């Protein structure tokens, strides 16, 4: 059996060798360090879930579509960055190019799959995006095979020790860049013409059209934006998890859980949902059993839907008569 | 004549089953037809829920799995008779459907889809993780076949007769439900829940009722799977299978009982046909899903009819 | 002695997010009465209908039907007690045929459950035949028997309104609420609607209607209740209401009053 591994994403060698492994239990200080360790890994994963979840929420708000292909954008981001880096490109350049490439793929996906399906019902849109996800995943398998690829961390391999718990520099990168992206996104949505137009188009498409906003362009833009966010999440997590063709599906579903838990309408809510989910998962897999770790996300999803369907932060949807 | 229509239909159906069963060569086609039959049973129930009552479920693979695992565990580990195992599966699935359905069916549209999706994934994870009970990811082997009145349905061909007898029965029940006071009320809820409520239809109770019925269908199919293939693995009951079931309903046509047969058949055969493409199989499957949904969102039968009518009209216009 | 009250509203009120949509409204509908509810747009008429039929629950007050409180009951139970309605914006089951729409109205008065239906038990088939027969009778009553097998969505608006009435009558109500039944009807159709409302009363069904067509309202109603801004402004026979100064003011604007 694998040693109790606080973070799903850590490879086993790193986990077993890491000084954070709980060796002695029952000692309060050790316990505290252990909890801190779960918190670190939870926040790391949570930030990734948040980025993916924001992608869901941007598309949902613009189109009322749940894009089940979102997770595949994450996978593509990771694998494209890895491929570019292995060609000798510097990490930042590979990062930037990978995100741009996936953004383009997001645009193509919107154009071919979503816009062609004008009269589709919610159910057929679900099937279309799932089909798109299957297609993208299949293509990735054709290109990259079933092997896992590594991407070097952005800086340093050595875990930093903090109050008895360890944290990888990459985790700090993930958290910092997530904060940067979220703040940037909020600023974009509230202070730029394009961002305001996007919000207007999702708030009331008819009125937006009347004041001259091209709603179809906003929909297109929402797909580009969420593909970019997904790809960024993929590049960020790749040094920790490795990049494989089928890494996107579960990550996508987790991001989706984060979005629903936080409330699809609010970016801040999705971030909160993602972090909450990440920490809950880390605690559950550390303290209960790592096998049920994936179930935790969906259990929280159900609890939120049953008791607070508008999400933790979201407003109650207004009654339509 | 109308009075005897059902009996004629039933007669024709079983005649066809008997002919097919005795003529089919080899086990491959029989096994494939068995799988189609099982999928038809689930899809008939899911279509009652989606097409008639207008409620989506992205977690029906869970009930399929609950039936299969209850049957497998009770008959293999505890040596219970398969028929009792099947009944126990129905009981468990029915209970779970009530417990999940009461809160979930208060949600609408996408939120209901999310809740059923979450439920389905949790159950699938439980099948994987409870390896002391379910055998874990490597699956559950050595499940005994049905034994009825001294008959053992061991071979795929005898399994075929068993499965398709049940398919005929379920088809009969479903056609009757659709064409009844209950079916009418369900369609009413789909069209306007407000008006249905005002006319005295207890929409919440009926939605739950049909959710439970569709869960029972899926559980039944699961038990049949366990006892005809003698082996089950958790990968058969995951999120992708739930999506596949929904796709079968939509491809066959929402609110079309006969379309369900077609949808189940097409989507069960398709991967078999695509297997010659090896690694391309998944890609082509994804592509077909998208293309069918984009161009024929109302399903294969109605979509093709629509296209044909459109063409006729165009020709007349000229 | 007054005839016994069928429906009694006592100080009924509801507010939506600070806006008091209905304020302390009290009135009665007697058995065999045709009562009209009038008032300018936004006066709270449809809200009051939704309160009576259980689509909304009042914040204050009591609604009695046959002297029993019904406020807070779910709509389908209120329908079972004998209150049925039509909708201002037609709410038919568009994908079902005309006669099937009416057959849904029989739902609450019949009992074939899932099992009986699935197994086609003889009694459930007899019940189904009776449902169809009764529904066709109600269609004939409103004059739609010729369209029985058309899809409801394909009917012209006038026929859709009649179909809603037939569907509501099929629930065997003691009280029928009609929400702007004449909206969108032409002159001859309105004339036929008037006869239909009288024919409904002949069947010992009381009628409460919301209507903007004043000549129709004045002709059919025994009594009129006037609402304005959620409050009861006046109540009385049509002739009194026509001369009531507050009503005239509410309808024609305050300027005229000066």
Image (spheres, rainbow, N blue to C red):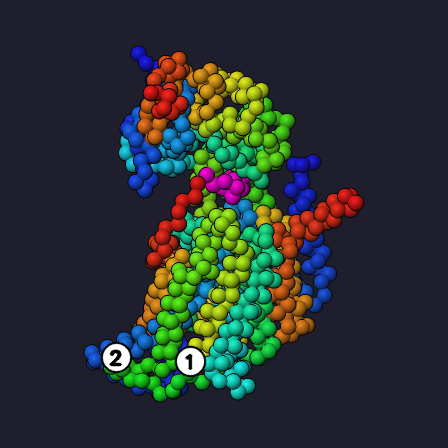
Q: Residue at x 49, y 50 (%)?
A: A211
Q: Residue at x 54, y 46 (%)?
A: B52
Q: Chain of mark 2?
A: A
Tell me if residue A115 is in the magenta stretch. Answer: no
Q: Nearer the viewer, residue B63 or C147?
A: C147
Q: Nearer the viewer, residue A191 or C180?
A: A191
In this rendering, the answer to whether B113 lies above or below A160 is: above
In this rendering, the answer to whether A246 lies above or below B253 is: below
User: Which residue is the site of mark 2?
Assistant: A33
Task: Give the residues in magenta.
Answer: B182-194
Q: Residue at x 48, y 37 (%)?
A: B196
Q: Separation of disc 2 and disc 1 at Cα?
A: 21 Å
Q: Chain of mark 1?
A: A
The dominant secondary structure in magenta is: helix
Tell me if residue B183 is in the magenta stretch. Answer: yes
Quarter of the image with the C terminus of chain A is top left
Query: As drawn, is B304 to the left or to the right of B128?
Result: right
Quarter of the image with the N terminus of chain A is bottom left
Residue B242's spot in the image, x, y percent?
Answer: 52, 60
> Which of disc 1 and disc 2 is earlier in sequence?
2
Query: As drawn, is B235 to the left or to the right of A304?
Result: right
From this viewpoint, is residue B142 visible?
A: no
Residue A234's spot in the image, x, y percent?
Answer: 47, 74
The residue positioned farthest toward the top in the image shown: C1
User: Which residue is the site of mark 1?
Assistant: A240
Residue A232's spot in the image, x, y percent?
Answer: 46, 73
Residue B151's spot in the image, x, y percent?
Answer: 59, 60
Assess whether mark 1 and mark 2 are in contact (beta carbons under 8 angstroms): no
For residue B268, which quarter of the picture?
bottom right
Element type at marker 2?
helix
From this viewpoint, is residue C95 visible?
A: yes
Q: Residue A163: which disc?
A: none
């Amino acid at each position: 059996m694998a040693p109790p591994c606080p973070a799903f994403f850590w490879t086993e060698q790193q986990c077993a060798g890491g000084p954070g492994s709980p060796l002695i239990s029952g000692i309060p200080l050790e316990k505290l360090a252990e909890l801190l360790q779960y918190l670190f890994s939870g926040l790391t994963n949570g930030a990734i879930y948040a980025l993916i979840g924001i992608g869901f929420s941007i598309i949902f708000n613009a189109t009322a579509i749940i894009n089940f292909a979102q997770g595949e954008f994450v996978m593509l981001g990771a694998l494209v960055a890895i491929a570019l880096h292995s060609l000798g490109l510097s990490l930042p350049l590979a990062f930037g190019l990978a995100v741009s490439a996936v953004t383009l793929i997001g645009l193509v996906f919107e154009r071919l799959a979503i816009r062609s399906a004008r009269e589709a019902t919610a159910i057929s849109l679900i099937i279309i995006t799932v089909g798109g996800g299957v297609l993208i995943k299949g293509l990735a398998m054709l290109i990259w095979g079933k092997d896992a690829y590594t991407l070097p961390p952005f800086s340093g391999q050595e875990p930093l020790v903090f109050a008895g718990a360890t944290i990888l520099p990459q985790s700090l990168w993930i958290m910092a860049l997530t904060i940067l992206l979220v703040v940037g996104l909020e600023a974009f949505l509230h202070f730029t013409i394009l961002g305001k137009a996007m919000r207007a188009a999702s708030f009331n498409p008819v009125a937006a059209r009347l004041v001259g906003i091209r709603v179809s362009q906003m929909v297109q833009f929402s797909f580009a934006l969420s593909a970019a966010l997904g790809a960024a999440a993929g590049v960020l997590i790749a040094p920790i998890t490795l990049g494989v063709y089928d890494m996107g599906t579960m990550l996508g579903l987790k991001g989706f859980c984060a979005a629903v838990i936080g409330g699809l309408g609010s970016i801040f809510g999705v971030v909160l949902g993602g972090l909450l989910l990440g920490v809950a998962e880390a605690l559950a897999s550390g303290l209960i059993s790592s096998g049920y770790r994936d179930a935790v996300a969906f259990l929280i999803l159900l609890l939120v839907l049953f008791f607070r369907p508008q999400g933790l932060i979201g407003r109650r949807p207004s009654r339509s008569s | 004549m109308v009075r005897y229509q059902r009996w004629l239909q039933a007669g024709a159906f079983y005649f066809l089953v008997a002919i097919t069963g005795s003529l089919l060569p080899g086990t491959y086609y029989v096994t494939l037809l068995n799988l189609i039959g099982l999928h038809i049973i689930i899809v008939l129930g899911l279509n009652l829920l989606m097409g008639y009552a207008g409620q989506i479920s992205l977690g029906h693979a869970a009930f399929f799995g609950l039936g299969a695992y209850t049957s497998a565990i009770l008959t293999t580990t505890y040596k219970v008779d398969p028929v009792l195992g099947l009944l126990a599966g129905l009981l468990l699935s029915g209970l779970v459907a009530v417990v999940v359905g009461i809160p979930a069916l208060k949600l609408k549209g996408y939120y209901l889809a999310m809740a059923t999706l979450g439920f389905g994934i949790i159950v699938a994870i439980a099948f994987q993780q409870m390896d002391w009970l379910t055998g874990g990811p490597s699956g559950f082997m050595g499940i005994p076949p049905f034994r009825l009145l001294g008959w053992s349905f061991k071979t795929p061909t005898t399994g075929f007769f068993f499965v398709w007898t049940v398919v005929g029965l379920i088809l009969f029940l479903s056609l009757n439900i659709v064409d009844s006071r209950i079916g009418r009320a369900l369609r009413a809820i789909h069209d306007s829940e407000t008006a249905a409520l005002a006319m005295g239809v207890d929409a919440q109770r009926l939605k739950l009722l049909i959710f439970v019925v569709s869960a029972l269908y899926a559980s039944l199919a699961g038990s049949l799977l366990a006892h005809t293939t003698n082996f089950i693995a958790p990968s058969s009951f995951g999120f992708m299978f739930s999506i596949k079931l929904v796709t079968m309903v939509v491809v066959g046509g929402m609110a079309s009982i006969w379309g369900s047969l077609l949808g189940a058949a097409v989507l069960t055969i398709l991967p078999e046909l695509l297997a010659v493409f090896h690694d391309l199989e998944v890609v082509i499957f994804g592509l077909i899903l998208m293309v069918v949904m984009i161009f024929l969102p109302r399903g294969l039968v109605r979509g093709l009819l629509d296209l044909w009518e459109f063409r006729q009209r165009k020709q007349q216009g000229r | 002695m007054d005839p016994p009250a069928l429906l009694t509203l006592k100080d009924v009120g509801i507010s939506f997010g600070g806006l008091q949509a209905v304020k302390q409204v009290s009135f009665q509908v007697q058995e065999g009465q045709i009562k009209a509810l009038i008032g300018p747009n936004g006066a709270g008429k449809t809200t009051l209908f939704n309160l009576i039929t259980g689509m909304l629950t009042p914040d204050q007050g009591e609604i009695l039907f046959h002297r029993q409180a019904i406020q807070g009951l779910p709509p389908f139970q209120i329908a079972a007690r004998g209150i049925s309605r039509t909708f201002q914006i037609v709410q038919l089951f568009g994908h079902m045929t005309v006669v099937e729409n009416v057959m849904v109205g029989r739902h609450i008065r019949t009992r074939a459950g899932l099992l009986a239906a699935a197994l086609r038990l003889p009694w459930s088939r007899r019940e189904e035949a009776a449902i169809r027969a009764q529904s066709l009778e109600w269609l004939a009553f409103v004059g739609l028997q010729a369209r029985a097998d058309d899809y409801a969505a394909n009917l012209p608006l006038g026929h859709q309104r009649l179909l809603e009435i037939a569907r509501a009558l099929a629930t065997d109500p003691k009280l029928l609420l009609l929400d702007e039944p004449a909206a969108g009807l032409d002159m001859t159709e309105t004339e036929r609607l008037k006869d239909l409302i009288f024919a409904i009363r002949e069947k010992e069904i009381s009628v409460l209607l919301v209507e903007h067509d004043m000549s129709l309202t004045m002709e059919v109603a025994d009594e009129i209740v006037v609402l304005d801004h959620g409050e009861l402004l006046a109540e009385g026979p049509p002739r009194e209401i026509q001369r009531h100064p507050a009503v005239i003011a509410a309808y024609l604007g305050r300027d005229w009053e000066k």
